[in-house]
Amino acid sequence: MNTCHQPTEAGLDSFRIAKITFARPDDWHVHVRDGSLLKALLPHTARQFGRAIIMPNLKPPVITTAQAESYRQRILDARPTQGPGTTFEPLMTLYLTDNTSSDEILRAHKSGFVYGVKLYPAGTTTNSDAGVTDIRHCTAALEAMQQTNLPLLVHGEVMDPLIDVFDREEVFIDRVLEPLRRDFPGLRVVFEHITTRSAIAYVRDADAAPGMLGATITAHHLLLNRNAMLVGGIQPHYYCLPVFKREAHRVALVEAAISGHPRFFLGTDSAPHPKNLKENQCGCAGCYTALNALELYAQVFEEAGALNRLEGFASFFGPDFYGLPRSTDTVTLERSSWTLPEDIEASGVNVVVFKISKALSWKLC
Ligand code: NCD
Ligand code: ZN
């Protein structure tokens, strides 16, 4: 990471970093949707990130390699035609169902463009109805993934009406994740968008070789706790899944992200929904962070006094896990106080941009 300094208001002998340049990051978990929303919003992701793991929870979901191939083409067609986003590379995933065959996994592996298979326990989140009702139905697919080294990306929550929504991640570890890793010791797993101390401890302390276990952490879970969603009136734009947790969990997430531990890496889980579907009697889950994701992460690392750890988290540990080369391209952030924009209009649909109440300190050049 290259830095350059500027004098602060405190005087010439006191210096603050004015610019940071580091390897271009990748987003290891993002929803870029389809159709006109894809066309309007993809440039936001593409101008910041070199690559991104593309979530498959479209309607209908991306369950075959053939579907992933045509979705990939639609994403490539939506890339900006000028500037840094022109070379953005979508890394595709398949949506695991009770019926995913081992042949489909082999096809995905051979394709060269599928980098993971996503487990949505049925009913846990947006467009997860076609997800897995019982992981025991997936034995053949999981064995094939184990053989071909294709990682399983897990939405780590149980769907059980008796389990409180704030506890669903913790229960998932005991009921699903730990038995799964015991039964498939060669299966590579990413615990997506972790939100609790239990998930952090599980990932950090697990007995796993490099490249076998990782976890993504979102910017919004690093920045906010559940009060943001529930205090002073209900705030539908802060409703996402997994739902925000207590402050102690947020603090632990920041510690994990800045720790330099290679199992924790960047995944925005940016998930745009039309404004009217969030401000609704039954509002959709998802925060739209892709517009300014990198600046949001930089804010967290700066406030934690750990800007020097941002590059590992954002640009190194993800490709290392996926066995891909680290980026040789760079991005530069400059110190600048600015506030996040209001809603954006994307092809006639309003999307509310994720905001925090204070000014941000870093801006992408
Ligand atoms: C995601 C979406 O809208 O697709 N929503 C969310 O709250 N994160 C789905 C998901 O990742 O759970
Ligand atoms: Zn997601």
Image (cartoon, grey):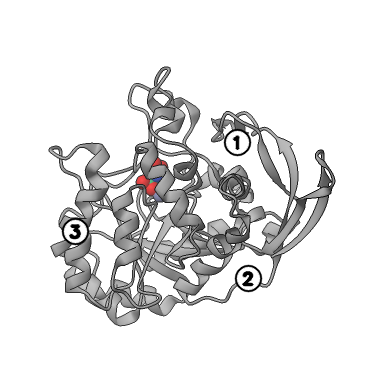
Dot 2 amino acid type = Ser
User: Which label sits on residue 347?
Assistant: 1
Badge 1, how many Cα within 10 Å: few under 14, some, many 20+?
A: few
Regarding mark 2 in the picture, which secondary structure is present there? loop
Q: Is residue 265 left or right of residue 56?
A: right
Q: Is residue 319 left or right of residue 328?
A: left
Mark 2 beta carbon near ligand 2 (under 8 Å): no
Badge 3, how many Cα within 10 Å: few under 14, some, many 20+?
A: some
* Dot in front, 1 or 2: 2
**Residue 28 vertical position relative to residue 166 in the rendered view, above or below:** below
Q: How many marks?
A: 3
Q: Residue furthest top?
A: 233
Mark 1 beta carbon near ligand 1 (under 8 Å): no
* Dot in front, 3 or 1: 3
Q: Is residue 127 left or right of residue 79?
A: left
Quadrant for ligand 1?
top left
Sequence-first tag of 3 and 1: 3
Where on the picture, by quarter, is residue 251? top left
Sequence-first tag of 3 and 2: 3
Regarding mark 1 in the picture, which secondary structure is present there? loop
Residue drawn at the location 22% of the way across and 53% of the way down? 172
User: Which label sits on residue 7?
Assistant: none
User: Marks 3 and 2, Cα distance to the nearest angstrom?
Assistant: 34 Å
Q: Nearer the viewer, residue 2 or 363?
A: 2
Instruction: Please say whether residue 102 is visible from this viewpoint.
Output: yes
User: Marks 1 and 2, Cα distance to the nearest angstrom?
Assistant: 32 Å
Would you name the residue on which mark 3 appears? 176
Image quarter in which the N terminus is found: bottom right
Would you name the residue on which mark 2 appears? 327
Where on the picture, by quarter, is residue 282? top left
Mark 3 beta carbon near ligand 1 (under 8 Å): no
